[in-house]
Amino acid sequence: MDKLSKPADYIADSSGFRHIDTPITDFDTAYDNGLAVPAVASYISAWEEKAPLFRANWPNSQLDLAYGKGARNRYDLFLPDQMPKGTLVFIHGGYWRRFDKSYWSHLARGALEQGWQVAIPSYTLAPEVRIAEIVAEVAAAVNHICKGGEGPVALAGHSAGGHLVSRLACKDTALSAEVQARFCHVTSISGVHDLRPILRLEINADIRLDADEAFAQSPALLEPLAGVALSCIAGADELPEFVRQSGVLANIWSGFGIDTGSWQVKGRHHFDIIDDLQKEDTALTLHILGIERLP
């Protein structure tokens, strides 16, 4: 059974940094969540079991809808049993290289039970495309999903998805004026916000990031949208670099006068921090939807 965290488990990080005693000498290890959590295969297996079961049993869903011309430009839309109070778009992670919408359907439950509709898109993966193209696809997905709708829009993303939603919250965003006007909250969960360290990783052979793109696509190096509310959340048991990456964006963007903050969740790591999205009354679900703020 998935363990649930409580509001008291969320530690506000006012500094934006975690102390590291020595400089990083092995960047691959510093950014390898699979190596840090040996049971990662069991988490992926659980997602592969829970997600299709949820899709099969949720009574009101529209699956595999197109938002663009690409083969992976598809999304699943889950609807509550009432007029939706708002729209949550969840963007998945996988280092921009793995997974698709089919792994995450069960994470829609918490917001659905709060009366929100939830959309989960796929996007084209590296190395077929570069990060800038993925950002453009995700913006197109959000614009399509929210076009002509009503009510607030919340964006949440995990890992690489955390990078993508925070990138959409930047001043040069490709999101439509309509979506921007409906924004209520953007939440990056275990996101990477300064891409420059990715240049040092072996997996960059697939991601194909260069110095110019790393600068251009790093939310921590860009200006936020005026008035955006952004939260950065990481597990306290994550790799130090992911805790730092979470804190640094809120730290920098606070200087622009926006509503932002960073939290660490006790006892959670990179792969179980998203579990609480399955429940309607958890601190994570309520915070993402703007219903109750974290302490």
Image: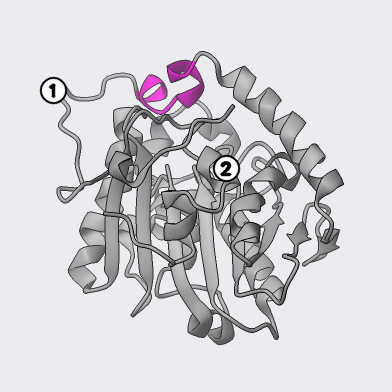
- Magenta includes 53? no
Q: State whether residue 38 is above or below residue 104.
A: above
Left/right of residue 191 with respect to residue 156 in the rendered view = left
Residue ID for mark 2: 93
Mark 2, other Cα within 10 Å: few <14 / some 14–19 / many ≥20 = many
Magenta stretch, residue numbers: 27-37
Q: State whether residue 129 is above or below residue 67.
A: above
Residue ID for mark 1: 21
Task: Identify the amino acid type marked 2.
Answer: Gly
Q: Which residue is drawn at 69% across and 38% down?
A: 99
Q: Which of 220 and 75 is in front in this view?
A: 75
Residue 33, visible in the rendered structure = yes
| Image x and y of residue 190, in percent | 42, 42
| Image x and y of residue 46, in percent | 68, 27
The local secondary structure at tag 1 comes to loop
Q: Nearer the viewer, residue 271 or 200?
A: 271
